[in-house]
Image (cartoon, rainbow, N blue to C red):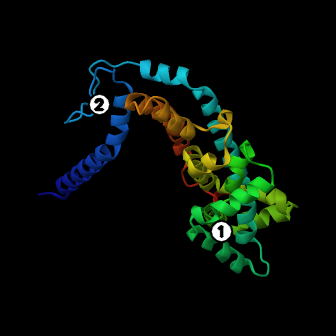
Amino acid sequence: MTNSRKSTIKTLLIYSILSVIAIIMLFPMLWLISTSLKSPTENIFQSPPELLPSQPTLNNFAQVWQSLPFGQYLYNSIFVSVLTVGLNLLFCSLAAYPLARLSFLGKNAIFIAIVTTIMIPFQIVMIPLYILTIKLGLRDSYLGIIFPSLASAFGIFLLRQAFLSVPKELEEAARLDGSSELGLWWHIMLPAIRPALITLAIFVFIGSWSDFLWPLIVIQNENLYTLPLGVAKLAGTFSLDWRLVAAGSVISILPVLILFLFLQKYIVPTDTGSGVKG
């Protein structure tokens, strides 16, 4: 057997295994979409499961949209998630830049202290955060939902590592041109770590979009409910009609899928060293 034939068989085997794994991982999503399209006369729990609805309908989506203010929930989630991403990128990059590129006393100790907080579960700091939110008057507000996610230790760690990968020649050239520290951060460093920024943006957006526990604690006004709270309310409203719950879940995950498909092409390494080649 020739080497090319062996390589072809190996490639086919690898892709076959990956395809099987992909189908297994995508099955819950396919079942969710299938359930959201099934009519009330179809059995959604039959065995083996039937992924293709025999009588597909969009009435489940219409009923969900009309029965609850899902449009308001969608707006709340988009507003909170986008603002959370923007503030997180701003504060994390401002914190990561000096930890990566500047020299000052205690820099390593500060970085170790920040990274150590990753190991602390949110449930431990939840009550102190809630008390602080109340004292700041942020309960029942968008800012109250965003407050715990203004910055993250993971984001600071990720961006610090990205800043460390930027060639020093770019920084030195900018300083010779008279760039200030803030201008260097904005015009040189941030464009150089765009893939890391987009990666962090995706993680923060998904985390904020799917967050259920904190909004449940801090929000009482139903007009400020995000989509996870709306889907939970949906389950109680219809006595757990799985078709309608599935339709609401599909509505809630669709923006995340669109965002990932739109941004994944930007998650590629940038040639930060091209600006210093002779």
Q: Is residue 191 above or below residue 30?
A: below
Q: In the rendered structure, which amino acid carries the disc numbered 1?
A: Leu
Image x and y of residue 106, in percent: 75, 81
**What residue sits 80% from the left and 61% below the top?**
174
Give the residue at mark 1.
164
Q: Quadrant of residue 1?
A: bottom left
Q: In x, y percent, where is residue 58?
A: 42, 19
- Compared with 271, 165 (above or below) is below
Q: Is residue 277 visible?
A: no
Q: Residue at x 56, y 26 (%)?
A: 68
Closer to the chain start, of discs 2 and 1, is 2
Label 1 sits on a secondary structure element that is helix
Residue 206 vs residue 35, the one in the foreground: 35
| Residue 256: percent from left, percent from top | 53, 40
187 sits left or right of 15 in the view:
right
Residue 8 visible: yes
**Amino acid beneath label 2:** Ile
Residues packed near mark 2 inside 10 Å, few (<14), some (14 to 19) or many (20 plus)? some
Residue plotted at (57% across, 50% down):
213
Q: CA distance from mark 2 to mark 1?
A: 52 Å
Q: Find numbered disc 2 in the image and state the secondary structure of the residue it sits on.
A: loop
Name the outermost residue toward the left.
1
Point out residue 60 in the picture as x, y percentages from the top left corner.
43, 22
Q: Is residue 88 above or below residue 29?
A: below
The quarter of the rendered structure image containing the C terminus is bottom right
Q: Quadrant of residue 200?
A: bottom right
> What residue is pinned by disc 2?
44
Against 175, residue 73 (above or below) is above
In the rendered structure, the answer to whether residue 189 lies left or right of residue 206 reads right
